[in-house]
Image (cartoon, rainbow, N blue to C red):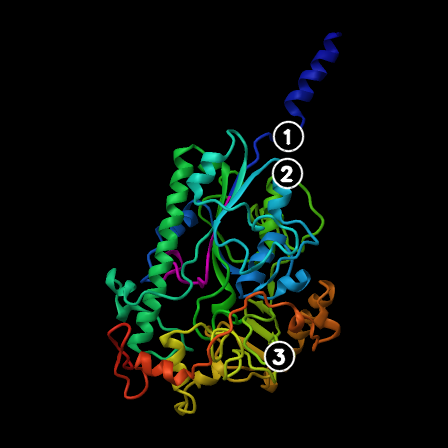
Amino acid sequence: MPAFSILLLLLSFFYSPQKKTTQPNILFLIADDWSFPHAGVYGDQVVRTPTFDRLATEGALFTNAYTASPSCSPSRASVLLGRYPHQNGDGGNLWSEFPNAYPTYVQLLENDGYFTGSTRKGWGPGDFQTTGFTHNPAGKSYEDFKAFLAEKPKGQPFTFWFGSSDPHREYVANTGIQTGMKLENVVVPGFFPDYDCVRNDILDYYFEIERFDRESGQLIAMLEEMGELDNTIIVMTSDNGMPFPRAKANLYDYGTRMPLVIRWPERVKAGTVIDDFVNFVDFAPSFVEAAGLTQNSMSGQSLWPLLAGEKQDREQVYLERERHANVRKGDLSYPMRAVRDQNYLYIWNPIPERNPAGNPTVHQSVGQYGDVDHSVTKFLIMALEGKAEVGKPDLFELSFGQRPEMELYDVTQDPYQLTNLAANPAYSKIRSTMHQKLLKWMEETGDLRAADPRSTFWDGVRYVANDQRENVEWKKLVEEYKILPPFGKYAKEGIPCLPN
């Protein structure tokens, strides 16, 4: 071979792009009902989250991460499919059938040679077998991460889903306060009454956040021991907001705004803080791209360009929900659509005559106002019906009352979203602009409610759970909890239910 040809061959070897041979592992750590900003790194002075805080220090911390829907099944389907809930048909509801028209990121990676698995709560609750899945769409089920790693072939990349059940209810009373957390240090959201028993309820929620954080740290320690930490994309987040009134199953911030950190030294600079808006539909395309693959079915944007400092259209985020629990006569949904930016949250309720928290009498699931999980906080707010103080928010109406078709909140001045500005003439232009943005997004993404706002599609979707509940009047439950005036001790806690 001539010397010149040999030189060209050598130059091409050293200077042409070389294909990366090592695909990253993916460890997805997802809590069940954990809201922003309940982590130490976000400034919470009570809950202790050393694992989450460490990942934020060594990777990227997101301050505006939002679930696609504040409900378990549709949220998790959007994570797996990279598609908005309304694009996932039946999967837009809780207790649904998992859609099979498009591949999940787990399937795409598995087809490319990844070893895949999950433990505890993957996608769900719902039915994935009817649509052809032989195991949970989040991955084949394993007893734990250790068992998964023991079965993984050496040298094979993996994706693993750790789905904790924390901090989902029910809680063991007093677990938070028994670990040394103090009632007086709790910041009570403005849509809750400030009573010691409510503060104690929040501490029990914090206790389970801490347990999720601790268990996540144990998985990360295993990665370190096997020398795979830096070749693993670690994502730590939650599926939807805290299981309290006006949080979970709602499009207000405490229902949709999520804690999120991502660690991957190859692409994420330590100590990065991302204030741009991201949506859970962005996870799947990010994982697929990181593995060196392509896809054409996902609506989300890869996060890697954003983390590299590239400009993306992330000035707002779009949110939605359909039927959460089956809590309205006729199995009816309560549809909501929303757009959130740095200044405002606009929510559109296209069928406002329905009850947003569920009917006041039990239909099938949970109990009265069944879109809200039972708790002392729920029962206390229910006991406040008709007792709003002059000049203060009506806490019962905020959590359980009917809502107008349009809601608009100034999130900088009103972080708890207590004052609806939609009917205020001074905000009419802002309301109109945000409504048009929302409709444009709905049309572009094929939302049935863009053309037919009162569509009955999600009303008729099969509700998989057969959990008919006894119609126990809530006042009987309140008597059990002993929280009616004069607010004696909360029987299950021994914490005085007295106002602060």
Q: Helix, strand or loop at disc 3?
A: loop
Q: Which residues are magenta?
A: 27-44
- Crowdedness near tag 2: few (<14), some (14–19) or many (≥20) residues, C-alpha within 10 Å: some
Distance of mark 2 from mark 3, alpha carbons?
47 Å
Q: Quadrant of the C terminus?
A: bottom left
Q: Position of residue 375 (x, y in %)?
A: 38, 74
Q: From the image, tell me which residue sits under label 3.
A: 330
Q: Position of residue 204 (x, y in %)?
A: 33, 65
Element type where label 2 sits in the image: loop
Query: Of the residues tagged 1 and 3, which is closer to the observer?
Result: 3
Q: Are marks 1 and 2 in contact (CB under 8 Å)?
A: yes
Q: Residues within 10 Å of mark 1 (few under 14, many from 20)?
A: few
Using the rendered view, name the quadrant where residue 493 is placed: bottom left
Question: Which residue, given by chain and number where applicable, does mark 2 sit on?
Answer: 292
Using the image, determine if residue 53 lies above or below residue 380.
Answer: above
Residue with the mark numbered 1: 19
The stretch drawn in magenta includes residue 41: yes
Which comes sooner in the sequence, label 2 or label 3? Answer: 2
Q: Nearer the viewer, residue 108 or 97?
A: 97
Left or right: residue 427 versus residue 486 is right
Picture quarter containing residue 4?
top right
In the image, residue 19 above or below residue 31: above
Q: Which residue is at the front of the view, 384 or 173?
A: 173
Q: Position of residue 181 (x, y in %)?
A: 27, 63
> Would residue 197 appear left or right of 4 to someone viewing this image?
left
Identity, as a three-letter code, of the amino acid under mark 3: Gly
Say what amino acid the circle numbered 2 marks: Gly
Residue 184 position in % (x across, y down): 26, 71
- Amino acid type, label 1: Lys
